[in-house]
Image (tube, rainbow, N blue to C red):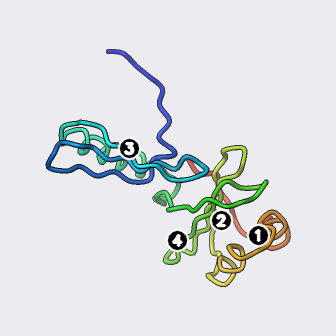
Amino acid sequence: MKLSKINLSGLIAIAHDEDFQLSLLIDRGDGLECVDIPAPVEAYDGLQDLDAIVGAQLPEGKGAIASQPVASTMAKSLGYNEAQKLLQIEFQSGAVYQYQDVDEETWDAFQSAKSPGKFFNQEIKGRYYSQRSLS
């Protein structure tokens, strides 16, 4: 067996079609890219299994949150789960933190802030319980 270290953090979504094409939607940081790879349906199934395994290991059963790129020197991307009131920030360093009990109004204001970094420092940092995510 040959082991290889891989980083799937930019992988957003997968699909498989009847032509045996595995489609990967990848966040490249400056935009999204769809890549098609010839692969059997088992490759698609394997990626879904991997997602279930990794998702089960995230803190307190919280799965990865769909994030959107942000123009900021502080963060690469922001995401929010309305049902869980969970804010997720991927910092420029690559660290991903989740902030609990963030109301939707704060999320809306964060998204529309002229300076996400200033908003973070004034309205979020130190005000919400946070935990580094494994995603």
Foreground disc of the pair 2, 4: 4
Describe the element under mark 3 as helix, strand or loop: strand
Q: Identify the image quadrant of the N terminus.
A: top left
**According to the image, label 2 marks what residue?**
99
**According to the image, label 3 marks what residue?**
35
Dot 1 or dot 2: first in sequence order is 2
- Mark 3 closeness class: few <14, some 14–19, many ≥20 residues within 10 Å: few
Where in the figure is residue 12, as x and y percent of width and height?
Answer: 44, 53
State whether residue 35 is above or below residue 64.
Answer: above
Tags 3 and 1 touching, CB below 8 Å: no
The residue lying toward the viewer, choosing from 49 and 68, is: 68
Tags 1 and 2 touching, CB below 8 Å: yes
Q: Residue furthest left?
A: 18
- Type of amino acid under label 2: Tyr
Q: Say the numbered circle drawn on residue 81.
A: 4
State whether residue 119 is above or below residue 90.
Answer: below
- Mark 1 closeness class: few <14, some 14–19, many ≥20 residues within 10 Å: some
Alpha carbon distance from label 1 to label 4? 16 Å
Describe the element under mark 1 as helix, strand or loop: helix
Q: Residue furthest top?
A: 1
Q: Seen in the image, is 113 located left or right of residue 87?
A: right
